Amino acid sequence: MSPVDDNTGGVGRRRFLRGAALAGAGLAAGGAATPTGASADRPTIAPFHGTHQQSAIAAPRRVTVFTALDVTAGNRSELADLMRVLTERARFLTSGGTPSPVGITGPPADSGILGDRLPSGELAVTVGAGASLFDERFGLGAHRPRRLTAMPSFPDDDLRSDWCHGDLSLQLHADDSDTVLHALRDIARHTRGGMQVRWRLDGFTNPPRPSGTPRNLMGFKDGTANPDAGDAREMARLVWVGKGTGEPDWAVGGSYQVVRLIRMLVEFWDRVSLSEQERMFGRARVSGAPLDGNTEHDVPHYAEDPKGDVIPLDSHIRRANPRTAATADQRILRCGYNYDRGMDANGNLDMGLLFCCYQQDLARQFETVQKRLTGEPLTDYIKPFGGGYFFALPGVRDKTDWYGRALLA
């Protein structure tokens, strides 16, 4: 059976996608509400429209679903249809509103798990493209972002093929699990003829305990030394692809996304002494301060500790960010989530880190840092098993724009 003419259930893939696009447009136009802002304890959700996907650099929400997808659209035109549908669904789900009623003989227009009206301003969406999207299927090879490749296996990895790569990446961010699950079901329903899930992992963040940066499942604060996402100049220097960088014109405004699924061997970690744990990280567990400091955001003084007597030379923070003039442009913007998948087949706790980061240049930034981390003491207690490289698409600029329009139109 031809993928273009798959009429399973009496609805062709191309007609299904076109119909979903029209339905999505009608829902967004008929029921969308303007985001109302944020409560005192919840920062404002990233806006949907703009030059960039601001959701990529926004503070992590409490819950995320990260999904890699394989495109099953049959040709470039169908891929464009798929991206229009995905845009319409994301626009409606992020802005909120009431789904349009359907006939009494048809299925409900919505799963109903959020009630009869979608709240506004409670969901953010980030969409990326993997290197495999630029193969021969859609004639996009000449337009591939210059630095985009399939994620390689690094020396300390134990990658599983069924948890790696994908044509597209889709990340849903919210503060409630039902919000992201509702969005995932909605998008899956409306795009079933054009893409399917390759792998998926759900994540969560913890509230600051007692204050400052949230902690990972090893008990340490995670992301203390991140670049300032509110500094537009810093983001232009480290995160966003700009003009004059050798990238295709359509890619300007996007960013390289790295996803790493990292299992933490917590049952072994919990048997390690606190002083040894702290020396592996280079920080005090309770306060998050570097071992030569007093508070979380104190700057470590490596020059005054050249032999690593206080902060070991092979500690995580020292290798990840040596804080020299030569390494300043290697910083990444990380957005980490914890995950918990219960138990593995051997009865061991299966939990860890859903690591995501953004940068302007994969080789200059993530890969350089990753190579410095090779063989660090923490590798005895963590095992990367999946993930991928993606290119977070430029933002959807307005109501007439759609994901990848400059690439596909």
Image: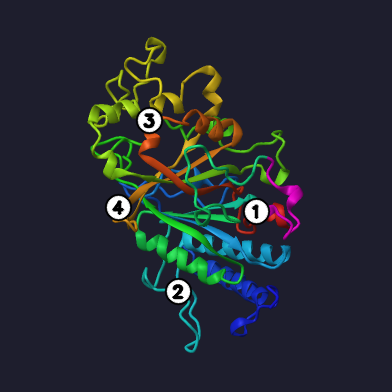
For marks 3 and 4, the one nearer the N-term is 4
Q: In the rendered structure, which amino acid carries the disc numbered 3? A: Pro
Circle 2 or circle 4, nearest the eye: 4
The residue at 41%/60% (across/down) is: 180
For marks 2 and 4, the one nearer the N-term is 2
**Element type at marker 4?**
loop
84 on left or right of 334: right
**Element type at marker 1?**
helix
- Residue 137 position (above or below residue 50): below
148, 206: nearer the viewer: 148
Residue at which label 1 appears: 132
Residue at which label 4 appears: 348
For marks 4 and 1, the one nearer the N-term is 1
Could you tell me residue 158's position as x and y percent? 47, 45
For marks 2 and 3, the one nearer the N-term is 2
364, 254: nearer the viewer: 364
In the rendered view of the protein, which quadrant contains the N terminus? Answer: bottom right
Q: Residues within 10 Å of mark 1 (few under 14, many from 20)?
A: many
For marks 1 and 2, the one nearer the N-term is 2
Image marks 2 and 3: residues in contact by CB distance under 8 Å: no
Tell me the magenta residue range: 132-146
Residue at which label 2 appears: 110
**Label 1, label 3: how many angstroms apart (C-alpha)?**
34 Å
